[in-house]
Each structure stands twice: as C-alpha cells, then as structure tokens.
Image (cartoon, rainbow, N blue to C red):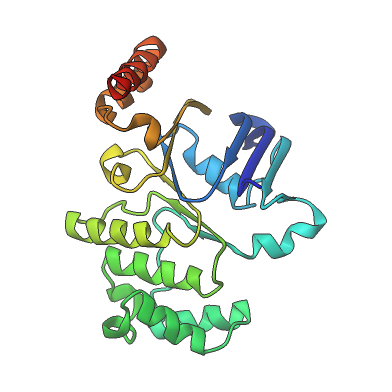
Amino acid sequence: MPIIEFENVKLGYAGKPVLEVESLSIDEGITCLLGPNGAGKTTFLRGVAGILKPITGRILVYGIDLFSPEADEIRSKIGLLPENSFPYPEMTVHEYLEYWAEFYGVPDSSVEKVIKMFDLEEIKDKLGSSLSQGQKRRVMLARIFLIEPELLILDEPTANLDPEVSYNLMNLIKRMGKDIPVIYSTHLLREVEPIFDRLLFIKRGRIIADYTRDEVEGVNLYELYMKISRGVEDDVEKSIHEKDAQVHV
C-alpha cells in the first residue's frame, strides 16, 4: 500500500484551485518537491498534512482519506515543520517541549528522549527568543518527534540557515528518512540532491516531472532542472534516454 495517494485532487483557497494532481502515489524514503516560489509546494504539503481540504478528490495516507471520520488517529501521527516556524520566545526549550508533551498526552520521559535525539542538552534552559535559526529548527523537530510521527513533512526547512547549520540539518533529515517517510519541499536543488529518493518537479500548480534516484543516476540534475523549468519536455526525455543508453552499452 502506498504511504500517500492523490486521487483527482484539486487544492486551493476560497474555492479557487491553485494545485491539481490527478493521480500520484508516494512510498517510503525521502520524496522532494522541487519548484520555484509560488509553484504550489506549500499547498501540496498542507493537503498531505490534513490542514487543507481538497476542493475535489481525495488524499489518502496509509489508505485512509484524511478528511474522513476515521482519519483522526493517522492525522495525529503526521509531523509538519512549516516554513519559518519558531518556539514561543518567552519559554525555555525544556518548558516548550514539556508544554507540547502535555498537550499531546505523552509521558515526561519523551521530552528527555527528544532532547537527547536532537542534541538540545546545552540549550534546554535557553529562552526561545535567544535561539539561533538552526537551534529553533532542531527544537521544532524535537517537538514533532514527541508524537513519534509516521510521516514527516518539511516545508523549506533550511530557509535562512547558514551553510554549516544547513548541512548538519540535511544530514539529520537523511538519517530520519531511513526510518520514516519524509516529504520535503524546496526551490533549491543543491539541498536535496544528496538525500532524495524521489524528485517531484512542480510548476504553476502541477507536477510536471517525476523521477526516482535510479532514473536520473548519471544525469546532470542542474541541466535537467533548467530544462524542466523552461518546459523543454523533449530535451528532458532525451537526457533520460541518453543516460539509459549509456548504461546499457
């Protein structure tokens, strides 16, 4: 069974569609949604997270329609890291995680577990207002893992991070992707090139290309991305076919 399924989905706001996905199935691993700002990436993620109800069609996670009466349990196991999220500035890291542990109804031991998991021991007594952007992201990920998520959704997780912090966060995400499915959105190919298992290219509210890592092995992804962005479908297929021909020579 696929982890996520889209069936004739239109997503949008005030009844106006901004994203259309006729048919899509997503399995285990790290699936990266790549496209320019305004392409529909965040709308896609809001649909998968069960925040935005489709205008038409269905989104299923583990075979359950996210907006059906029986979906409460699976929705509670979806971890979403929105863009530019940050802890409450007046709380310490420890207080913040304790607050959410109580909200989620999980034991206090879960707080200590995620503090260790995300290397927060040295900053657990710091106020949210004093944290760097990278520290805030780690705290938010720790909060998500209080619920032991079965699906992780990341919206531009490295936005406004310096290169070293971004690199460390990407390594962390890569490790997490071995245990749970991850959906990751970005407009930066260089971020996801080392970690993706599948690439979905999105433009103007539509998924215009879909490749697994095996399918693009040996292909210059930057050239491919530029061709897809320009809408040069014939050149894209030629690039993939040329790669296949070289493999079979």
Count how many numbered circles sit on residues in the image.
Answer: 0
Residue at figure coordinates x 69%, y 34% from the top left:
7
Work out which residue is located at the far front of the displayed protein and give it: 249
Q: Seen in the image, is 76 located left or right of residue 112?
A: right
Q: Quadrant of residue 136?
A: bottom left
| 1 up-or-down from 94: above or below | above
Rendered-image quadrant of the C terminus: top left
Q: Which percent across, then down, holds residue 78?
A: 58, 60
Q: Residue 27 at what x, y percent from top left?
A: 55, 46
Q: Looking at the picture, does residue 106 appear above or below residue 171?
A: below
| Residue 60 located left or right of residue 182 | right
| Residue drawn at the location 18% of the way across and 59% of the way down | 164
Which residue lies most toward the top here?
Answer: 234
Nearer to me, 38 or 77: 77
Nearer the observer, 210 or 67? 210
Please determine whether, in this image, residue 247 is positioned above or below residue 107: above
Q: In the image, 154: left or right of 27?
A: left
Question: Can residue 220 be seen in this snapshot?
Answer: yes
Q: Could you say which quadrant of the image residue 105 lies in?
A: bottom right
- Residue 156 in the image: state x and y as whole percent: 38, 49
Q: Among all residues in the image, which is located at the extreme bottom? A: 108
Q: Quadrant of residue 196?
A: top left
Q: Position of residue 162 (x, y in %)?
A: 20, 56
- Residue at (28% x, 64% y) in the render: 134
Q: Residue at x 37, y 13 (%)?
A: 232
* Residue 126 showing in the rendered view: no
Report whether 189 appears left or right of 59: left
Which of these two is toward me, 16 or 239?
239
Residue 100 higher or lower than 185, as above or below = below
